[in-house]
């Protein structure tokens, strides 16, 4: 707008000798009209943008980091307040983009920039799966700054959230001698001054057994790691393992402010196998696949007879109609 005003002032200066002529006034009127139209258009555009921005909803975005057996992922959860209740946001149409260190296009030289993008699920969350080359390009990186950004959604305001996570890992040791079976989890984190992973004391690491849909805790409740970064517990001997004769033991540090969620697990041989449900024979209360053969044959026979009779009657009606036309 300032540039147009400068053009207008220059035009006035260059055409000062024509102010007393009809052409001079026409030119001034045209310039003033043109500048006024541009100013009005700019004002309407700004007002519309302000209205659109004010009408869009805001939400809260929470980030968390998960490391499971050295495989890292980033989870995003989206929610907002409605009628004093927190509800999940699941209708964001714009993609959520994950960046490493800074918001920019992907840089293949150091692996920073745009890593991945996703759409929010019906539950209002999503998990970014890092590509395979992420670990290769960032092998020497031990502090990760992840940025998740969403913009250009017609219903919700633009949002951006950052999380910084230090590198840590959990290892599991299993002892199955005699009648006592124990597991020991060791939590270590990277320390630049030592140029190595060092034990992390006073951290609440949970010992658990991975089941199909969840984790089953064992050992002392609320136990924290000692000076060597370790916590141990006895395994329940009567617990059934996996169908392949193994048991999957995990150590978990959950939602730590410095390391996020860290998991480390190992599968060990286990003698107690899960119980198998006996195969049901062909009984009246079984599913359709196990119905008695006599009942299946009877049902099919009855259906065939009924439909056969119907088609036979239809064919007789057709013949009667044809005979009526011939006479």
Image (cartoon, helix red, strand yellow):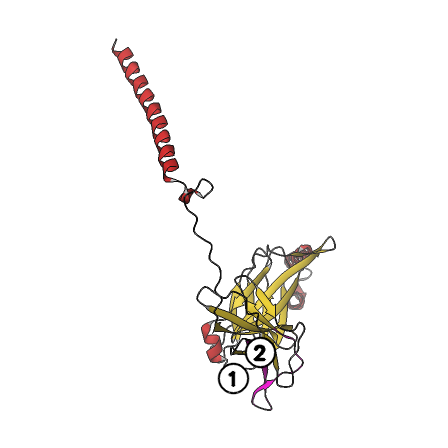
State the image coordinates of residue 303 (x, y, percent, origin top left). 37, 30
Marks 1 and 2, how far apart at CA: 25 Å
State the image coordinates of residue 221 (x, y, percent, origin top left). 66, 71
Numbered range of the magenta stretch: 180-206
Question: Is residue 293 found left or right of 148 in the rendered image?
Answer: left
Q: Residue furthest bottom?
A: 194
Question: Is residue 301 found left or right of 222 in the rendered image?
Answer: left
State the image coordinates of residue 17 (x, y, percent, origin top left). 66, 65
Relative to 184, say whether 13 is above or below.
above
Identify the disc placed on residue 185. 2
> Could you say which quadrant of the image residue 225 lies in?
bottom right
Question: Is residue 310 found left or right of 12 in the rendered image?
Answer: left
Q: Nearer the viewer, mark 1 or mark 2?
A: 2
Q: Secondary structure at mark 2?
A: strand
**Residue in view at x 45 percent, y 64 percent:** 243
Identify the disc placed on residue 268. none
């Amino acid at each position: 707008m300032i540039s147009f005003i400068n053009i207008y002032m220059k035009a006035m200066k260059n055409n000062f000798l024509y102010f007393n002529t009809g052409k001079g006034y026409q030119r001034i009127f045209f310039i003033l009209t043109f500048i006024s139209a541009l100013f009005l258009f700019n004002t309407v555009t700004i007002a519309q943008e302000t209205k659109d921005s004010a009408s869009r909803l805001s939400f809260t975005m929470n980030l968390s980091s998960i490391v499971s057996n050295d495989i890292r992922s980033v989870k995003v959860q989206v929610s907002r307040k409605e009628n004093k209740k927190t509800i999940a946001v699941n209708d964001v149409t714009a993609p959520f983009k994950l960046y490493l260190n800074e918001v920019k296009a992907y840089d293949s030289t150091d692996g920073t920039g745009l890593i991945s993008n996703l759409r929010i699920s019906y539950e209002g969350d999503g998990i970014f799966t890092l590509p395979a080359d992420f670990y290769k390009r960032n092998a020497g990186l031990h502090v990760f700054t992840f940025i998740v950004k969403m913009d250009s959604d017609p219903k919700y305001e633009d949002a951006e959230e950052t999380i910084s996570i230090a590198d840590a890992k959990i290892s599991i040791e299993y002892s199955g001698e005699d009648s006592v079976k124990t597991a020991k989890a060791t939590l270590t984190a990277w320390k630049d001054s030592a140029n190595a992973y060092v034990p992390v004391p006073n951290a609440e690491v949970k010992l658990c057994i991975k089941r199909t849909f969840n984790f089953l805790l064992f050992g002392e409740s609320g136990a924290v790691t000692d000076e060597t970064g370790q916590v141990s517990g006895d395994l329940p001997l009567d617990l059934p393992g996996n169908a392949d004769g193994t048991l999957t033991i995990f150590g978990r540090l959950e939602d730590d402010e410095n390391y996020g969620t860290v998991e480390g697990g190992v599968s060990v041989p286990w003698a107690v196998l899960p119980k198998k449900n006996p195969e049901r024979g062909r009984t009246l209360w079984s599913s359709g696949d196990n119905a008695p053969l006599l009942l299946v044959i009877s049902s099919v026979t009855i259906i065939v007879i009924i439909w056969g009779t119907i088609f036979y009657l239809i064919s007789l009606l057709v013949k009667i109609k044809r005979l009526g036309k011939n006479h």
